[in-house]
Amino acid sequence: MPQDMPPAGGYHQVQYKRNIPVRGFRPIVYVAGMVGCVAYGLYKQYYAAREQYEIGREKMWARLHILPLLQAEEDRDQVRRYYADKAREQSLLGAEIKVYNSDRFVRPTFAYTPAKVTE
C-alpha cells in the first residue's frame, strides 16, 4: 500500500496565533508612571511632615512665651480672691482672725468639691 505524501507545494500554514493588534503602552511605561507617582507622593509626604513638625515647634514656643502672661493672670486672680476672702471675713466676723501660727503667705489652693447630695 502506498504511503500518503504531502502535496507538491506543501500544506498551507496553520494559523495558531491570534492576530490581535497591541493596545496601550509597553509595560515599562506603566511601571515608570507608577514609580513616578509613588516618588511624588513620598516627596509631598516628606515636606508635609517637616511642615507639621515646624508648626508644632512654633506652637510650643508660642506657649512658652505666653506662660508669664498666664502666670501673671493667675497671680492677679489669687490676690483678688485673697482680698475678697478678707473682706468677707471682716464683714461676717467683724475682726480678722489668725488661722495660722505664722504671718508667712501661703498660696491658697482652690479645689472643686462637689456639693453633698441629700436624698
Image (cartoon, rainbow, N blue to C red):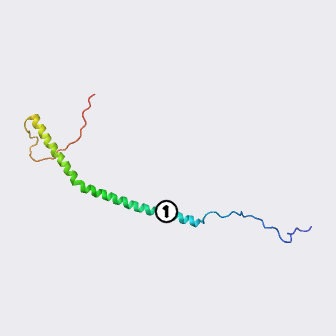
Residue at left offset 13%, top offset 37%: 88
The answer to which of 113 and 54 lies nearer the viewer is 54
- Give left or right: position of 99 versus 2: left
Image x and y of residue 11, in percent: 82, 68
Image x and y of residue 64, in percent: 25, 56
Residue at left offset 16%, top offset 43%: 81
The amino acid on which the numbered mark 1 sits, given as a three-letter code, is: Val
Q: Which residue lies furthest to the right in this view?
A: 1
Q: Residue furthest left?
A: 95
- Give left or right: position of 85 versus 19: left
Residue at left offset 24%, top offset 54%: 66
Q: Quadrant of residue 6?
A: bottom right
Q: In which quarter of the image is residue 17?
A: bottom right
- Give left or right: position of 97 versus 22: left
- In this rendering, is residue 74 above or below 85? below
Q: Which quadrant, please, contains the N terminus?
A: bottom right
Image x and y of residue 114, in percent: 25, 36
Residue at left offset 37%, top offset 60%: 51
Rate crowding at label 1 as few (under 14), some (14 to 19) or many (20 or more) other CA atoms within 10 Å. Answer: few
Looking at the rendered structure, the number of numbered marks drawn on it comes to 1
Question: What residue does disc 1 label?
Answer: 38
- In this rendering, is residue 20 above or below 111? below
- Give left or right: position of 86 versus 48: left
Q: Which residue lies furthest to the top in this view?
A: 119
Image x and y of residue 14, in percent: 78, 65
Q: Which quadrant, please, contains the C terminus?
A: top left
Dot 1 falls on a residue whose secondary structure is helix
